[in-house]
Image: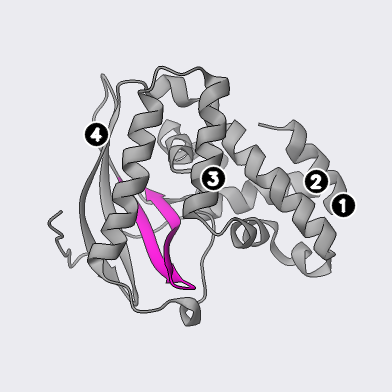
Amino acid sequence: MVTRVKKRMTPISTPTRNNISRRALLAGLGGLAAVLLLPASQARALTASQATGLVDKVVAEINAVINSGQSEAQMIPRFEAMLQRYADVPTIARSCLGPAARGASAAQLSAYTQAFSGYVARKYGKRFREFIGSEITVTGARPHKDRFIVDTVFTLRGQSPFDVEFLVTDNGGAPLFYEMVIEGISMLSTERTEIGAMLDAQRGDIDALTSALRRAG
């Protein structure tokens, strides 16, 4: 894999419900590990090769699952397993929960995190069959502070290709991608909004939110 460094950074905008399109939903194919911003102090020395290597693995698995011919029920657990392998799920879930996480007990956070993982897999897994025959290609990596942005191109049958950026850091010695940006739409912002709205609907009750997540998606 030959890496390339771009000088121009793509701005990240905050989405609204009206501009969350099929492209935003497609980001779920990456397991939605793109929903946290790790503090810079957690990032360690990371190379372009390591960052690209991580996304190469993710993309290979996504392509394999999408085009496996399996049923929706079979694909969803595979994508949840990808989420567990390539993302810090507890940190992701806590980031989406926001300030409410500070008042939750360890047991509540554990139950919520488990429910969140399943919710994410189901939510996007139901759309997987729409992308049969699609292809995702890694095109290069570029530095972003002490991290890397890995560029990919998503090509769907009968539609124009579009760019997806994976932001990768080294968290605790293991490269993880922690954000995805689809044509300027931040998936971190999207999922914080969604979980926040669900928590509001439950009047701030984390246990009720956990139960809602188990039913949702």
Q: Secondary structure at mark 2?
A: helix
Whichever of labels 2 and 4 marks the residue nearer the N terminus, that label is: 4
Asked whether the beta carbons under mark 1 and mark 2 sit within 8 Å of each other, the answer is yes
Whichever of labels 3 and 4 marks the residue nearer the N terminus, that label is: 3
Which residue, given by chain and number where applicable, does mark 2 sit on? 209
Residue that appears at 27% across and 57% down: 52
Q: Position of residue 17 (x, y in %)?
A: 56, 40
Q: Amino acid at mark 1?
A: Asp
Q: Residues within 10 Å of mark 2 (few under 14, many from 20)?
A: many
Q: Position of residue 72 (x, y in %)?
A: 53, 21
Q: Quadrant of residue 155?
A: top left
Which residue, given by chain and number where applicable, does mark 1 sit on? 205
Q: Secondary structure at mark 4?
A: loop
Which residue, given by chain and number where applicable, does mark 3 sit on? 16
Which secondary structure is most common in the magenta stretch? Answer: strand
Q: Label 3, label 4: how many angstroms apart (C-alpha)?
A: 23 Å
Q: Mark 3 vs mark 4: give the one in front.
A: 4
Q: Which mark is residue 161?
A: 4
Question: Residues in magenta?
Answer: 164-182
Whichever of labels 1 and 3 marks the residue nearer the N terminus, that label is: 3
Q: Amino acid at mark 3?
A: Thr
178 drawn magenta: yes
Q: Secondary structure at mark 3?
A: loop
Residue that appears at 66% across and 38% down: 119
Compared with residue 22, is residue 147 higher up or lower down, i.e. above or below?
below
Q: Is residue 61 left or right of residue 210?
A: left
The residue nearer to you, when weighing 10 against 214, is 214
